[in-house]
Image (cartoon, rainbow, N blue to C red):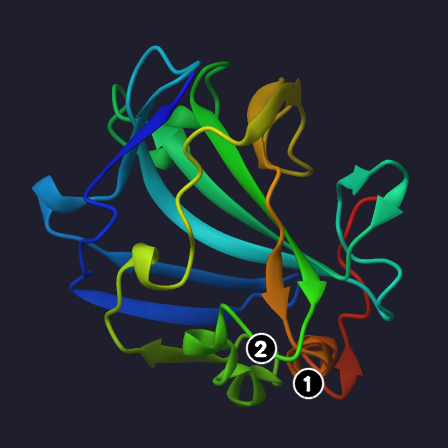
Amino acid sequence: MPLQWENYHSNPLFLKMTNTTNTVVLNGLYPTHFVPTLKGGPLLSPYKFVQLHFHWGERNEIGSEHQVEGEAYPLEAHVVLYKADYSTYEIARSMEDGVIILVYMFQTHHNSQINEFTKHLPKLKDPYSQIPLDTVSLESFLPSIVADYVLYFGYMAASCNHGILWIVSRTTMAVTEAELEDFRKISATAGVPIGHNFRE
């Protein structure tokens, strides 16, 4: 069943990237009626974009939380959305139908699909560092998942104690070796890299 995006091309009022000491998070503020929203497919209600974050490992053979035929990928992105029926993400994540996660896995390539913001990773080495970004749309660097996906109910570590819907893109994206090295230099504490932040 095809998924449908609304406002996927919308530019936020501001966009920022943060080193949380656990991951790198991308989020922003959108005009009220222009928040990127996903509906259709298996979804009975629309879901609004909250944030995008990443999982990686110390080497290319590990990093993704999902595997394909036993093979892990060096980088995985999670796009977090919450059900529009709830007034806030904080309320939604306590509800069984409140949150869904879109999953993108990355393979190494000489070109990158996410350079729009990975070029700023060297500025995020220090714990809790934060930088503003150009206000680009999600569409400009993240292809919309429409039909080529698999889905299942699973769990999101440390955020909720009930199952949530995961929608996993079957199409991998491209990341360069240099970008992976920049992710691996992100620090959890002064001078100590996060190392890996995926569930094993």
Q: Which residue is mark 2?
A: 111
Residue type indicated by callout 1: Ala
Where residue 156 sits, quadrant-wise, is top right
Q: Which residue is mark 1?
A: 178
Residue type indicated by callout 2: Asn
Quarter that holds the N terminus: top left
Q: Report crowding for label 1: few under 14, some 14 to 19, many 20 or more residues within 10 A (C-alpha).
A: some
Q: Residue at coordinates 75% horizontally, 40% vertically from top-left?
A: 66
Q: Whole-percent x and y of residue 101?
A: 52, 35
CB under 8 Å between callouts 1 and 2? no
Q: Residue at coordinates 66% horizontally, 58% vertically from top-left?
A: 106
Q: Residue at coordinates 35% horizontally, 70% vertically from top-left?
A: 16
Query: In the image, which is nearer the foreground, mark 1 or mark 2?
Result: 2
Q: Report crowding for label 2: few under 14, some 14 to 19, many 20 or more residues within 10 A (C-alpha).
A: few
Label 1 or label 2, whichever comes before in sequence order: 2
Residue 117 horizontal side relative to residue 5, left or right: right
Quarter that holds the C terminus: top right
Where residue 116 sits, quadrant-wise, is bottom left
Query: Between 197 and 3, which is closer to the camera in this rendering?
Result: 3
